[in-house]
């Protein structure tokens, strides 16, 4: 499942968290591309956040910072 810059429009953080729990329990590969504050656990512990960029993650594991909707990408190294 893939989405980009969509969950930010879900106003309530509890609703976002329920969505994350539901998707993670489906057994599917979840590729998200959202602001780092939208699903806070995905960005926890990351260093070097990029301004005006969103976090690309697979099943909650951060992979890269990208421009909104994906026009640019900056891969996150193992030391992130």
Image (cartoon, helix red, strand yellow):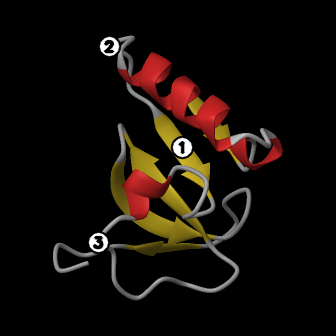
Q: Is residue 23 above or below residue 70?
A: above
Q: Provide residue 20's location: percent of width, then percent of height.
A: 49, 30
* Residue designated by label 3: 45
**First along the sequence among labels 3 and 2:** 2
Q: What residue sits 58% from the left and 33% below the top?
A: 2
Q: Nearer the viewer, residue 52 or 37?
A: 37
- Evaluate if marks 1 and 3 touch, with contact meaning CB atoms under 8 Å apart: no
Label 1's element?
Answer: strand
- Within 10 angstroms of label 2, few (less than 14), some, or many (20 or more) residues? few
Q: Nearer the viewer, residue 63 or 71?
A: 63
Q: What residue sits 67% from the left and 70% below the top?
A: 67
Q: Which quadrant holds the C terminus? A: bottom left
* Residue designated by label 2: 27
* Residue designated by label 1: 32
Q: Residue at the top extreme?
A: 26
The reply to whether residue 77 is visible in this rendering is yes
- Within 10 angstroms of label 3, few (less than 14), some, or many (20 or more) residues? few
Q: Residue at the left extreme?
A: 78
């Amino acid at each position: 499942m893939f989405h980009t810059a969509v969950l930010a429009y879900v106003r309530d953080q509890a609703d976002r968290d329920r969505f994350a729990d539901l998707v993670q329990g489906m057994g599917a590969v979840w590729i998200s591309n959202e602001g780092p504050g939208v699903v806070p656990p995905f960005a926890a512990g990351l260093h070097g956040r990029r301004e005006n960029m969103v976090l690309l993650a697979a099943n909650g594991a951060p992979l890269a910072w990208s421009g909104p909707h994906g026009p640019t990408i900056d891969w996150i190294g193992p030391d992130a």
